[in-house]
Image: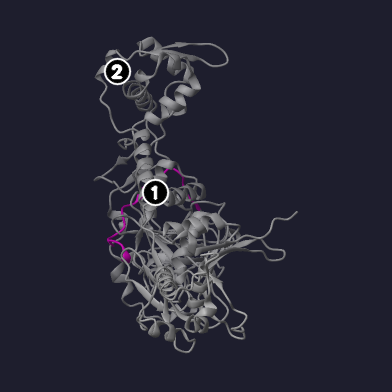
Amino acid sequence: MFKKSLFNLKTSAPLRSSDRRKLKQRIIEAHGVSPEIGDILVPEGLMSQKISTYTNERGVAYFSPDGDPLWFSIGKGEDDLIPTVYTLWKKYDLLPCISSPAAVIPFLIGGADLMIPGVVQISSQTVVPPQLIAITQHTNTSPTARGPPLAVGRLAVDLSMMRAGRKGKAVHVLHTWKDHMFDLGRKGDPPGIVEMEVVGEAIEGGDLKTAADPAVEDSPDAHAGEGDDKNADRSDLQPNVGSPPSAAPKTRVQPEAQLSKEEVSDLLRAAVLQAIESTVKSLSPSSFPIPAGTFYSSYILPFRPAYVRQAQLETVSGNDENSPTYPAIDIKHSSYKSLAAFLKDLDKRGILTMKDMKPEPLVLKVSASHSEVASHKLYTSLRDVQLKEEKREKREEEERSRVKEMEVRELWKPHAPSGSVRFFSEGGFNTSALYTHAELKAMVIKHITARQLINVHDQSFVNVNQDDLLLGTVARKNESHESLEFLKREEVIQRLSENMQSWYEIRATDKEPVLKKGQLKPISVGIKASKGRRASTFIHNFEPFFIEAEMMAEELRRTCAGSTSVSPMPGKGAGLKVLVQGKQIKAATEFLLSRGVPKKWIEVTEPPEKK
C-alpha cells in the first residue's frame, strides 16, 4: 500500500484532548489493553494528517509528538485503525503474529503479499480473515523468542488452508518496515528479539519446514507476491534490510506488566499515605465513616503513582525502553487476600481506624499525624494526571469558545440596468461605491427628509408618489405608478436594495478578507430521511465561510462517532455537501459556531414531528 510515495499530504494538526481520549478508548476496546497501555499507544500531543496513497486511496494518519506515524486508516468512513510498526514495537503482542523466514522479509518490504508457503508459525489459532495480523522474522534462538514486527496486514485465508503444499496468499500486506509510511517517521532499525510468555504454534499438517531449514529460505514459493510484483527488480532489497535483529538485546515481555505481590502491596500502602496527606486529612468529620469499597475506589486507586519503574522487565543485555507498560496495582495482585485484610493491616499499623462489619467494613478515621504519613513524599498520582488533563481540556474548550466570530457584511452597489444608478447620481451619491444596509437607510432618510416625503399622519410611511425619482426607483415591474402612493420606510430601503447589485464581504482571524459579487446564502443544515434507511444530516453552502468539506467531514466523523461523506451538489458550481450519519443537527451547528460562523448565517431545517 505504501510501496510508493504518498502524495497530496495535508498539514498535520494537533488532536484535541477529547478526540485523543475517544481514539484511545477505541483502541483499548479493539485490542483489549489496559488504559495505561492505551496512554502509551495513543500518547499526549498526538497529531493527525490526511494522506493519499499512490492509488488515490484517502485516509488519515496519526503521529506521535516526535513525528512517528503510529496509526492510520484508509478509505472514507473506515473506522478500523491499523497500527504501524512503530506502534507494534511498543507492544509486540498487540496483534496476533505470523513468523516468516528471513529470506521472505525483503520481498514483503518490496511490496509483495505473504504467501502460504512463507508461513512458519502463528501465535494464535483463533485469528480469522480479515483480521489484522503482524509479521515477524522467524527465529530459532528459543521456543518463546519473537522478533520485532516488520509488517502488518490482513489475514487472507482460514488457518485450515495453511498446510504444506497449498498455494495462495496468506496475508494481504498493508504496511511494512522501510515503506513510505515508515519513512514519514524517524526511521531506524527494529528493536531486539523478546521472550514471550505465550508461545506460538506451528501450522499443523504436511511436512512444514522451519526457518532453520535452507529449503524454506531458498524456496521461490515462500516469498512469491502478487503478479505485478513478481517481475519487479528486487536485486537491491536484501542489502537494505539490515542485519538480523536477533543480535539485539533480549527482553522478557509479558502480556500485561506485573510487579511482585510485595511490590504491589507497598504501592497500595503508598497510595493510602498519598491520599491521607493530600486529601483525606482535609475532610470534615461528618465525611466519616466511609464504606470500604468507597474508600478503595475514591482514595486508594486514584492515588496510585502515575509512573512506576518497570521491575517486570528482565533485561538480559543492555536496556530496553521500547515497551513501557503500567503494572497492575490492585488488591487482586497484592499479598493481601481481600480489601478487608488490607484495611486491617493499616488499622494495625495505626494509619487508619476501621470497623469490620457486615455487609462491608467501614473506615472510621485516618491518622494524619502518623509517622509514615508525615514522612511520605508526595508524588504524581493517577488522579493528578487526570485532573491535569481535565484542566487542559477545559482550557482548550474555553479557547475554542473564544474564537472570534467572523465579520459578515452584506453590501449593495448601484446597478444601471435596474435603474438604481439614476437615484444615486441625481441624489448626489457615489454611483460606484459599495453600501451597507445602514448606509442605505441613512441615504433614504436624507432623501425623504430633504424632499419632505414623510407622511404627516404616520411618520413610518413615505409618500413615494410625490417624488418621481424615488417612485421610478422603488416601483416594481408591472406595478402601476398611480396605485403606489406610500410605502413603509423599511420597504423603501428593501426595494432600493433589490434594484442594486448584491455583494458580500467576510473577514475572519488569520484569513485574507473575501469580497465577492453575488448574494450570500446561509449555511444550510438539515435532516435527510431516505425510505428504508437511517436519517442523515446534511450541510452545504459552507465554502464562503472558509470551511473545507473534507476537514468538516473528518471532524464530525470523530465527534458523532459515525460515518460521513462528501459529495457534489447538483448543478454547475453548486459546491459540495457533507452528509453525517444520524440526526446530528446539534453537533453540526456547534461545529460551525466553533469555527466562527455567526448564528444568523446558519439556517437549520428540521423535519416536522410525526403526530
Judged from the image, the secondary structure of the residue bearing numbered disc 1 is helix
At label 1, the amino acid type is: Glu
Image location of residue 14, percent across then percent down? 35, 57
Query: Which residues are drawn in magenta?
Result: 184-201
- Residue 188 located within the stretch drawn in magenta: yes
User: Does residue 204 appear in the picture of this structure?
Assistant: no
Residue ID for mark 1: 397
Give the main secondary structure, helix, strand or loop, of the magenta stretch.
Answer: loop
Say which quarter of the image contains residue 274: top left
Q: Residue at x 46, y 68 (%)?
A: 550
At label 2, the amino acid type is: Val
Q: Residue at x 62, y 84 (%)?
A: 480
Between 59 and 191, the residue placed more toward the observer is: 59
- Residue 531 located within the stretch drawn in magenta: no
Image location of residue 279, percent across then percent down? 35, 24
Residue 88 vertical placement versus 378 (above, below): below
**Circle 2 residues within 10 Å: few <14, some 14–19, many ≥20:** some
Residue ID for mark 2: 373
Between 117 and 597, the residue placed more toward the observer is: 597
Measure how far apart labels 1 and 2 are at the Cα level: 38 Å
Residue 3 vertical placement versus 563 (above, below): below
Residue 325 vertical placement versus 504 (above, below): above
Residue 533 vertical placement versus 34 (above, below): below
User: Does residue 569 appear in the picture of this structure?
Assistant: yes
The mark closer to the camera, 1 or 2, is 1
